[in-house]
Amino acid sequence: MSKSFTLKDCCDFQEGYVNPSQKQPEYFGGNIKWLRASDLNNRYVYDTERTLTEKGFQSAGKSAKLFCKDTIAISKSGTIGSLGILKNEMCGNRAIINIHVKQNLSNLMYIFYTLQHKRNELINKSGGSIQKNLYISALETLTLNHVCKDDQTKIANVLSTLDQKIELNNRINAELESMAKTLYDYWFVQFDFPNEEGKPYKSSGGKMVYNTILKREIPVMFSEGVLDNLGQIVGGSTPDTKDCDNFCIKGVPWITPNDLSNNQGNKYISKGEKNVSDKGIKSASLKKYPLGTVLLTSRAPIGYMAIARKEFTTNQGFKSFIPNKGYPTDFVYYTIKNSLSIIIQFASGSTFKEISTTVLKTVPIVLPPLHIVKDFTNKIDSLTKQQNILEQECSELKKLRDWLLPMLINGQVTVK
């Protein structure tokens, strides 16, 4: 049996204590990065959503200390166990614990991957009667396999290589998405689609007319429309979750808003956490929707989106668009995305905001002629195909990484 040691043997710990009063605007907007749990991305953290002034930082008194670059941050409350490797100096709020790995004893990335692997164990070690909290004392006693630093480095390098490829794919996809969205805006928001001479329509003096319904000028050949013109808007439902026969391993993907939350950063989706059986489909009167359908969460929260790669069903938290009225999937996707601020504005509800099908159908949009829409989708076709391929590659790489992680950390697999 391999010898074990604890996290305390190779790490030092520091609490985050910087929680400036939100009533003091002069505390915020400075040059000091202020790390909160929402900034942790389970990889490298270069920046933070919010920053502090020196005055805001010093409001924590003697507890005002910076976390060093190349250390690990972990969330101690809320979503316990979210991680980040800090690539710049920053301070942390009370939901953060900073872990400084003693580099002469252990490999930082090995400790990072070990913490990922042992997240459930850390959650179970958390204390508190009303709200669970991860304390330093629990982190200190976390048991690690005794692996020499050279072997730690080899293990970390294997896992990091996979993560680096995933990150590269994600960066490429972000650029591709930016290019596609920019082209959509250029053609259908600024109205500089190519005219008959190949020049930008509006900038080259193309005729514009004021539309009284949309309350703006649009190209003369465009018209006012509503989201209902883009396709059939459909909802979903939930089979009885107490009846396990309603769900199965090889059934039809059943998507929930939580699945789209976990899919953020991706444009496409293939499956959710659960698949529904034929019995479940029948019991909940579920309808199967085709690939290419655009999913939109309609509550809690409104606005998560994805394009279906395959036939699927959803729960009642969606208003999905089946593009069966002549407009291609990509155009439907970007037009809905462009309308999100209005969709959210139209939502109502006392407990939580929701957009109904009836109201969603009436959200106003600009409708271009179909031949211009088809020219647009032809232009971005290679971009979207590449996005789809890279997303699927990332999914396979993540499966491989998650399969290797426990075996490498537990010593079931060794690296030569």
Image (cartoon, helix red, strand yellow):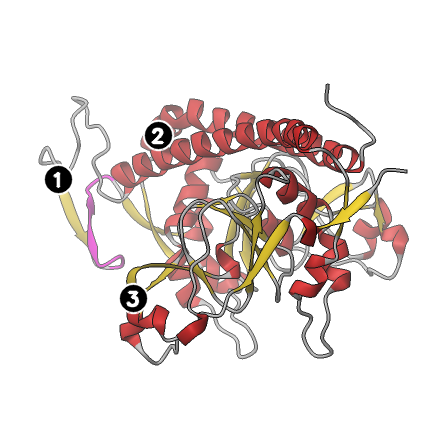
Front position in the image: 334 or 114: 114
Front position in the image: 226 or 147: 147
> Which numbered circle lies on residue 218?
none
Residue at the spot 77% in from the left edge and 62% down from the top edge: 124
How far, Cα to Cα, is label 3 from label 1?
Answer: 51 Å
Q: Is residue 345 left or right of residue 252?
A: left
Residue closest to the far left: 205
- For label 3, count other residues whose C-alpha is less than 10 Å away and answer few (under 14), some (14-19) or many (20+): some
Task: Kindly identify the amino acid type of the residue bearing the numbered disc 2.
Answer: Phe
- For the image shown, how many numbered marks are present on the structure? 3
Q: Quadrant of the N terminus?
A: top right
Q: List x then y, in percent, for residue 188.
A: 28, 41
> Closer to the N terminus: mark 1 or mark 2?
1
Task: Verify CB contact (< 8 Å) between mark 1 and mark 2.
Answer: no
The answer to whether residue 251 is magenta is no
| Closer to the eye: label 3 or 2 | 3
How far, Cα to Cα, is label 1 from label 2?
Answer: 20 Å
Label 3 belongs to which residue? 53
Label 1 belongs to which residue? 207
- For label 2, count other residues whose C-alpha is less than 10 Å away and answer few (under 14), some (14-19) or many (20+): many
Q: Is residue 262 left or right of residue 224?
A: right
Label 2 belongs to which residue? 376
How far, Cα to Cα, is label 3 from label 2?
Answer: 46 Å
Residue at the spot 19% in from the left edge and 22% down from the top edge: 198
411 lies above or below 340:
above
Task: Verify CB contact (< 8 Å) between mark 3 and mark 1.
Answer: no
Secondary element at image label 1: loop
Q: Which residues are magenta?
A: 213-221
Task: Kindly identify the amino acid type of the residue bearing the numbered disc 1.
Answer: Lys
